[in-house]
Image (cartoon, grey):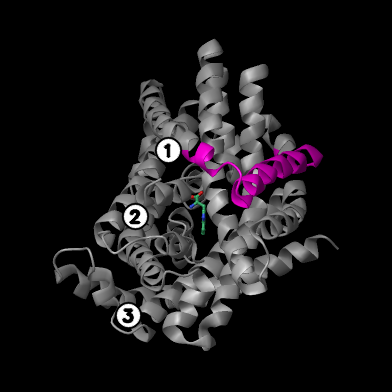
């Protein structure tokens, strides 16, 4: 499969639907959306190009790519990347498990009118863990080498289908009465809120998560590329597709929250915003709801699988390079450990939420800072590497400027506040168990 398709497969997943709508709901709507879009353009896109340039230039997996350009002192950063992969996949699998459950409900029973109230019960407990384990099993089988071709073909069909379904649902949502305040919430930015550092942190974390940045996943994809690829063009296409799907998902979720009177159900568990609003709409659509709902959650599940594969691949390729394990062994042992690490997230939405904060606010933003400094300041002449296969050099000047100054400055500004806040959330969570 082509690089652009594979990278879009990694980028488009639960982040675009589940995470984007939950963070937008939590952070006051439109102001968050504006910041997220701005940060994707000014920070996400340059870091995406930086990762791909590192990968293609070195033709190596993350740890070796860093050592290739920066010497052995940079190796430890590779371990930070691997840890991030561990942490993210552990709770990502739990949410993917919810999509399995919702697909089954749509197909076998149809959604109940009170599905919103059932969410907390569905999302936590032994069942949630088992479905997480089933999803992880599928991810491990793919990464261990079995069925990559099949998955890629399935993704090639289901991802466009997911896109069409989301567009269709956005049109459906527009026909609902009372959705107007939902659009206002989603699209009318309150400029006062733009200045909040907390919203900025969440928006930056989301930009990194959604584009699969900050832990070497895109670097790994880049390492398979030849010198005939036009990297700036291709990264713009990847980012555009990723942002586009998230934005349209918001056009579904927010009018629905208001039209169906779900604000209370959602504010009780913002983490579940998507899983509370959509099935409620499907419940009201009868048989059509079962078909559309089943297809929607099945497509989301496949999107989650292609993303999960890229997460596990970073861990596995590093284990193969670093410990000399076989691919089979690395995939099963590391995948098994990640499955176990998902146990607390499967039993508590609070734990899941904190894991999500730690992964994004500390690991991905910290990883992005390190990557921008690495490519901006340490790597010799990244511009000539990036310009192979591309035309024109005007934009590269801007790219390097962003990587050297704007990206690190913004990430430092955000991290200064996010690090203590996130650590506080962790200690708060630990304390709540005693
Ligand atoms: N981007 C994916 C999503 O939006 C998740 C993901 C896959 C990811 N690989 C990653 C996030 C690497 C961070 C880093 O669902």
Front residue (pair 178, 87): 87
Residue at (36% x, 58% y) in the render: 35
Q: Position of residue 344 (x, y in %)?
A: 77, 54
Earlier-in-chain disc, 2 versus 1: 2
Left or right: 297 with respect to 187?
right
Res 194 quadrant in image: bottom left
Residue bearing the label numbered 1: 249
Among numbered discs 1 and 3, the one appearing first in the sequence: 1
Task: Identify the residue position indicated by label 3 in the image.
Answer: 404
Relative image position of residue 330 (x, y in whole percent): 68, 60
Q: Is residue 145 magenta?
A: yes
SS class of the residue under badge 2?
helix
Quadrant placement of the N terminus:
top left
Between the residue at mark 2 and the residue at mark 3, the CA separation in whole angstroms equals 21 Å
State the predominant SS element of the stretch in magenta. Answer: helix
Task: Identify the residue position indicated by label 2 in the image.
Answer: 37
Q: Between label 1 and label 3, give the one nearer the viewer.
A: 3
Tag 1's secondary structure? Answer: helix
């Amino acid at each position: 499969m082509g690089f652009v398709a594979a990278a879009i497969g990694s980028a488009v997943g639960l982040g675009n639907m589940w995470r984007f709508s939950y963070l937008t709901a939590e952070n006051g709507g439109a102001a968050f959306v504006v910041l997220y879009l701005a940060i994707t353009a000014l920070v996400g896109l340059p870091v995406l190009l930086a990762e791909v340039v590192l990968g293609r230039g070195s033709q190596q997996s993350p740890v070796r790519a860093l050592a290739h350009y920066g010497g052995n002192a940079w190796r430890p950063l590779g371990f930070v990347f691997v840890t991030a992969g561990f942490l993210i996949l552990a709770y990502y699998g739990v949410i993917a498990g919810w999509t399995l459950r919702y697909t089954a409900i749509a197909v076998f029973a149809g959604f109940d009118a009170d599905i919103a109230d059932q969410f907390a019960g569905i999302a936590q407990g032994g069942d949630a863990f088992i479905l997480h384990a089933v999803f992880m099993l599928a991810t491990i089988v793919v990464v261990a080498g079995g069925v990559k071709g099949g998955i890629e073909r399935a993704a090639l069909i289901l991802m466009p289908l997911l896109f069409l379904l989301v567009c269709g649902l956005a049109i459906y949502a527009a026909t609902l009465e009372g959705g107007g305040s939902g659009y206002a919430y989603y699209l009318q930015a309150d400029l006062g809120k733009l200045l909040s550092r907390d919203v900025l942190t969440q928006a930056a974390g989301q930009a990194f998560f959604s584009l699969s940045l900050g832990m070497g996943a895109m670097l790994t994809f880049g390492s398979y590329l030849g010198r005939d690829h036009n990297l700036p063009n291709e990264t713009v296409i990847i980012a555009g597709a990723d942002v586009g799907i998230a934005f349209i998902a918001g056009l579904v979720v927010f009018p629905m929250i208001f039209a169906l009177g779900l604000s209370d159900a959602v504010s009780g568990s913002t983490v579940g915003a998507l899983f509370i609003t959509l099935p409620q709409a499907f419940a009201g659509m009868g048989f059509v709801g079962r078909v559309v709902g089943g297809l929607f959650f099945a497509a989301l599940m496949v999107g989650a699988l292609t993303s999960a594969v890229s997460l596990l691949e970073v861990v596995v390729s590093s284990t193969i390079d670093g410990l000399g394990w076989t691919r089979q062994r690395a995939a099963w042992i590391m995948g098994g450990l990640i499955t176990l690490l998902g146990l607390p997230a499967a039993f508590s939405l609070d734990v899941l939420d904190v894991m999500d904060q730690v992964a994004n606010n500390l690991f991905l933003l910290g990883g992005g800072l390190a990557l921008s400094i690495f490519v901006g300041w340490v790597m010799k002449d990244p511009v000539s590497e990036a310009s192979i296969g591309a035309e024109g050099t005007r934009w590269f000047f801007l790219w390097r400027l962003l990587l050297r100054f704007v990206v690190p400055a913004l990430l430092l500004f955000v991290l200064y506040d996010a690090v203590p806040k996130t650590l506080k959330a962790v200690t708060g969570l630990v304390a709540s168990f005693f």
